[in-house]
Amino acid sequence: MRLPLAFRTLATLLALATPALAAPAGGGDYKTALDVFYGGMADPLKYSESYAEVLTRGLDGRWAPLLSFPTGGGFADLLARTCERLPATIRTTPEHGFVLTRGNARGDAKYDVVFTPMGGSMFGQYTAPGPIFDYLGVKEGVGTPSLRNNILRANNGIATVNRLGENILVIQTNYGPPSLYGRCE
């Protein structure tokens, strides 16, 4: 007996839509998760108290935003060019926060983003209006109030900050995709 074409098509689509079998989580997966999201600590109480200290350890230095970078060949060259054109400097603060200073290649415009630890990987993020408006070329009387509000909203609030090794920093806010930074030096 032959099945109708529609039934065979439906059966094929259902078979293709079935998720692949997955293996149970392993110790290596758990260790990776602890390293990335808990700074290597398995105790949630220690995480909340000391993650910011672990995160900011060795963070000082020159960094660059990783925007549409290749994952293979060409990464190192593009990083070197980005470090020259869109430099960022990170300096840690005594309370295990940090200040990210973004500037342009000419050195005539820059602004600071201050990250203050709130517990675990959560940081308060603050950017003063004047310097970021100058950096972006938004002059007094130019642009709408909503443009200015959107700039401030995107650069202030709560950020989740993680390190993927010593040379990659990830800053995630509620208002956009994660910002990735690579160490220049």
Image (spheres, grey):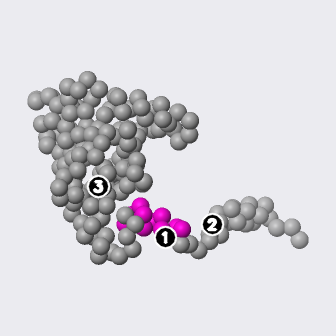
Would you name the residue on which mark 3 appears? 56
Q: Name the dominant secondary structure of the magenta segment.
A: helix
Q: Tell me which amino acid carries mark 2.
A: Pro
> Does residue 133 lie above or below 93 as drawn?
above
Task: Return the residue nearer the eye: 5 or 96.
Answer: 96
C-alpha span from label 2 to label 3: 40 Å
* Residue numbers of the magenta segment: 28-38
Classify residue 64 by image quadrant: top left
Which residue occupies 25% across, 33% down? Answer: 103
Left/right of residue 129 with respect to residue 105 in the rendered view = left
Q: x%, y% of residue 155?
A: 23, 46
Secondary structure state at the residue bearing disc 2 = loop
Classify residue 162 by image quadrant: bottom left
Left/right of residue 15 with respect to residue 109 in the rendered view = right
Dots 2 and 3: beta carbons under 8 Å? no
Q: Tell me which amino acid carries mark 3.
A: Thr
Q: x%, y% of residue 29?
A: 52, 67
